[in-house]
Amino acid sequence: MKKALGILLVFVMGVCLVSSAVPALADYKVAIVTNTVSQNEEEYRSAQQMVEKYGDRVVHVMWPDNFMAEQEQMVSVLAKLAYDVDVKAVVINQAVPGTNPAVDKLLETRDDVFIVYATPQENPPDVAERAQLVMMPNELEMGNTIPVQAKKLGAKVFVHYSFPRHMSQVLLSGRRELMKVKCAELGIEFVDATAPDPTGDSGLPGAQQFILEDVPKMVEKYGKDTAFFSTNCAMQIPLIKAVVDAGAIYPQPCCPSPYHGFPTALGIESDISQKGDLQHVIDETRRILKEKGVEGRLSTWPVPAAMMFTIAGTEYAFKVINGEVPFDKLDIAVLEQCMADYAGVKVESSAYTDEATGKTYDNFRFVLMDFLTY
C-alpha cells in the first residue's frame, strides 16, 4: 500500500512539474501591432478595446510614426515580440510597407506564431505566403462600387488623389484603373490628381494643406457635382472639410468607416471606447451635413472596417490558440462570423486571385459592404 502511495505521489509531483513548465492556454497572448493615433486612430483604439477585454493576454505595440523612413525600427518591433514565448499570434493593422521584412525577422526564431495581416500594402502573393490570415476591404471591386456610388450621389466628375508610393501598390493602382473604366461607362469624367506624400519632405501638414487648397480649385473648375477620393488615411479629414465647404461629393473614405475623418472634420465629440458611440457619430454626422446643405452628398460603410479587422483578427487568433480552429487552414465561416459579430450585419469575403499566375489564395480575404449615405 505504501509503495503504491509513493508511486502515486511521484506521478502527481511529475504532473505538477510539467504543468508549471508549460503555460496554460489562458497564459498565451496575442500581440497587436497598429499605427499611431496620428496615422489612424481607429486601428489604435480597436487594439485598446482588445486590451480592455483580454487584459494581459493582449500586447499592444505600435509601428514608428514615419514608418517609411524607419524600416529598421519596424523590424525591431516584431523582433522584440519574438522573445516573449507566450505570444502565439500577431495581428498587424495596418500591414504597411516594411511589414514583410519585419515578419521575416520574427519567423527566423518563431514558427509557432499565427500571423494576421490587415490591409497589407506589399505584393499580395508575398503577403499571403507569410500570413495565415489576410483581411482587407475589396480594393479592386471598389474600383467599380465607388464610382457607382458617386454617380448615385450626383457626380459628373471624379477626382482621384494619390501619390507614387501608393500607386506602386498593385491593388491600389489596379483599383484606379478600374475606376477610370467604370467612370467612362457611367459618363463621369475621371481626373487623376497627384498629391504630396504625407511621409515625404512636406510631411503630413503639407499634404493636408494641399488638399484644403486644391479641392476648392477643382470645384471651381469642374463644378459642385465633383466627387473626391483619396488613397491616404491622413488626407481624409481635410478632404471632408473641403468637400463640405464646397458643397461637393464624397462617396467613401479610403478606409470605409463612419469614424474615418468624419468626427474630426465636422467637430463631433467622439469616444470610440464608449458603447453606442458609433451610432452617436452616425446621427451627428447626418445632422451636421443636413444643416450644411450637403444631405445625400457624402457616404461611407456602416461600420469601421479597420476596427473590424483588428477585433475579428484577434478573436480568430484566440480561437487558433485555443484549438477551436486549425493553425494552417483558414476556417472561412468562423472568420466571417467573427466579423459579423462586430459589424452587426452579415459580412461576406472572397479569396484573392493573382491575375498574373491565376493562383487563388484562400487565406487572403477581400471584404465588401453596402454604403451608408448621409
Image (tube, grey):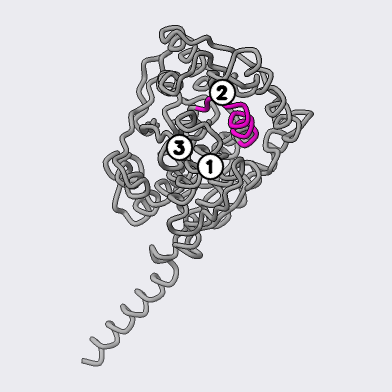
Give the label, 2 or 3, closer to the camera.
2
Q: Which residue is found at the position 47% from the left and 33% from the top?
A: 295
Mark identifier at residue 131: 3
| Residue 146 visible (yes or no) | no
Q: Does the magenta-highlighted stretch encompass residue 248? A: yes
Q: Where does the magenta region start and end?
A: 237-250
> Residue 38, relative to residue 30: is it above or below?
above
Give the mark toward the camera: 2 or 1.
1
Q: Could you tell whether 95 is left or right of 325 in the image? A: right
Give how far across and how far down residue 336 sits, in percent. Answer: 31, 41
Q: CA distance from mark 2 to mark 3?
A: 33 Å
Which residue lies under the disc numbered 2? 228
- Label 1 neighbourhood size at 10 Å, few (<14), some (14-19), many (20+)? some
Q: Residue at x 31, y 78 (%)?
A: 11
How far from the left and from the top, in percent, is residue 287? Answer: 49, 43
Q: Residue furthest right?
A: 201
Check disc 2 and give the amino acid type: Phe
Query: Disc 1 designates what residue?
Result: 288
